[in-house]
Image (cartoon, helix red, strand yellow):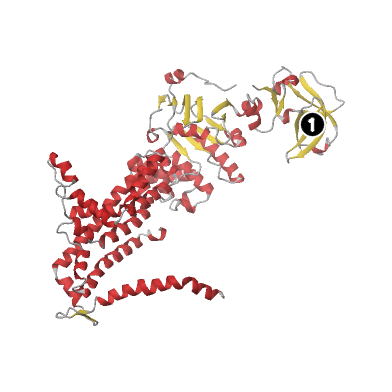
Amino acid sequence: MHASAQQAPSETDSTPAPGAVSLAGVSKTFGDFTAVEALDLDVKPGEFLSMLGPSGSGKTTVLRMIAGFENVTSGSIHLSGVDVTQVPPHARQVNTVFQDYALFPHFTIAENVGYGLRVAGVSRAERATQVGVALEQVRLSAVADRLPHQLSGGQRQRIALARALILRPQVLLLDEPLGALDKQLREEMQIELKQIQREVGITFIFVTHDQEEALTLSDRVAVFNNGRVEQVGTAREVYEFPATEFVAKFLGLSNLIPAELSADGVQSSVRPERVRLLTADTAASAGTVSLLGTVSETVYTGPTTRFLVDTESGVRVIAERANDHHPSAESAFGRGDRVRVEWTTDHASQIG
Amino acid sequence: MNRRAQLSALLALPMLWLIGIYIFSLVMLLVTAFWVTDPFTSKVKPGFTLRNFEQIIANPAYASTSLRTLGIALAVTVLSILISVPLGIFMAKVASPKLRAILAVAITLPLWAGYLVKILAMRITFTEEGFFNSMLGPLGISGPGFSIVTVVLTLTYLWLPYMAVPVYTAIRQLPPNLFDASSDLGAGAGFTIRTVVLPLIRPAIIAGSIFTFSLSLGDYIAAKFVGGSTQMIGSIIASNINLNPPIAAAFSLVPIAFVVIYLVSVQRTGALERM
């Protein structure tokens, strides 16, 4: 199943809202290669939407088409209810934070941040004031006179953000903006991004291949694969109820349960932490899928322990338990123990 | 062999070349400029006189020729920049890979033909009954004929590759997302070229200009074959080579001085370190 438009384009036409982005039947081909295929996607004003997918899944191409750097092969793009399909990038009310920041190497930080205002013909004095405010917002007033190469990756990242936000766009596009940062800095920047988005209240469209990042930051996640959107939904929806096998596998660990073992006779996906691990002599509960098996491996991951259970039905099921007790979960069962694994049917997601 | 001997073996030929041929000949040129010519026998005698330089300064023809040559060299350089920058942007950013390859060959083509062949080609193009006039004649326009304008055009034709190639290479090496970023921030193509492209490719333009400027300063064949009565520094040096070598040598120092002044002023901008 592929996600389809949640709204017909004609409806968005009649209700223009600043910051709404609507893609209808958008395709992009490069020669014989189809990068994006008949994509329908509606982003609500003020929403934080992540486009999540592996590299080559078309998410960056979609972002570039919204920015105007790439022409669409077919279909249309509306920004705030206005058809911008043929509008060049410099005339679109969107700004972009680029993957490797794309700061102008010959301009100082202040000149970089003020570039958009300079293009717009804002006076030097007014520019200086606004740049000062923007640099303060990202806590980098001290580096105003330096050149980009004198800054660290995290600082450059924040400057790129300030440069894009100073024009008060209706939509901010972010192309894997945290990809080049190390893990700790990434997590700091994620929190900062979320705060900034709440402050400015504009639409953020965020491209990432990091599922955790997408889940923690976004109001909604669009999962891309092979130029198509597999599913759009809240973090909870796409994680707990993946619509396709791809979504189930791409967003963390998943148990794929064949149709004959599922409650409703359709292939389903169950997250490991939804699988209960019981002693073999426990009776099966009502409203569950319950299987007997043997623990073949235990994996300690820090906050949790994973148990790999080979069930009698021939399916290997992963059960994950939080290490929140002492003695922790890892000591509850060992290799070779006979166990019962079961999950409530509500926690199984049918996948097509 | 020890390291020192190895190093000597490695550097023997280049050092011989550099000191024996290269530096020595330049020093001789400098020295000769102070020698004297016997007016009766036309023999050059070693000595020390500033007469050659006095003659150059006193004779207005030398001064005007120097200025004319400087003007020609600057005009060739400016024209080369005006052609190379838009061409480089088109090739790097707009043209299809196939068209780009064709243009790259077209730009470097003049380098493959002999020098005189190219001068002859320009002569045929601009001659009285030549291509230029016969095409434009019916429109009531006549070409520049053999004049200083044709000299500038011919020298630009000769030296354009030295500007176009580095400029194109520099534009290709600019990160593509700088163009995207500029346009994303609202800038049209002209603004982006002025504020982003030109400052970033300045080292390439300067590198190219050193060639177009100094090669033009030293030329005299173009002036001779397509310049009509146009005289350049080289024309005067050429005519004095046999008659009065010290004058020729003294006058040779003028273009060298121009180039040195140019290099020093360019060096102040910091562009040479990045070449």
Q: How many marks?
A: 1
Image point 73% across, 28% down: which residue?
A: A274
User: Chain letter of disc 1?
Assistant: A
Residue A188 location, quadrant:
top right
Residue B135 location, quadrant:
top left
The three-letter code of the residue at mark 1 reads Val
Residue A190: percent from the left, percent from the top?
57, 39
Query: Dividing the image into 4 quarters, which one contains the N terminus of chain B?
Result: bottom right
Query: Dividing the image into 4 quarters, which one contains the C terminus of chain B?
Result: bottom left
Image point 61% across, 29% down: which residue?
A: A235
User: Vertical placement of A285 versus A299: above or below?
Assistant: above
Mark 1 = which residue? A309
Seen from the viewer's position, the closer of residues B119 and A311 is: B119
Q: Residue furthest left?
A: B140
Residue A165: percent from the left, percent from the top?
45, 38
Residue A12: percent from the left, percent from the top?
45, 21
Residue A312 location, quadrant:
top right
- SS state under label 1: strand
User: Vertical placement of A251 versus B117: above or below?
Assistant: above
Seen from the viewer's position, the closer of residues A325 and B246 is: B246
Image point 38% across, 38% down: which residue?
A: B186
Q: Residues within 10 Å of mark 1 (few under 14, many from 20)?
A: many
**Residue B60 in sight here:** yes
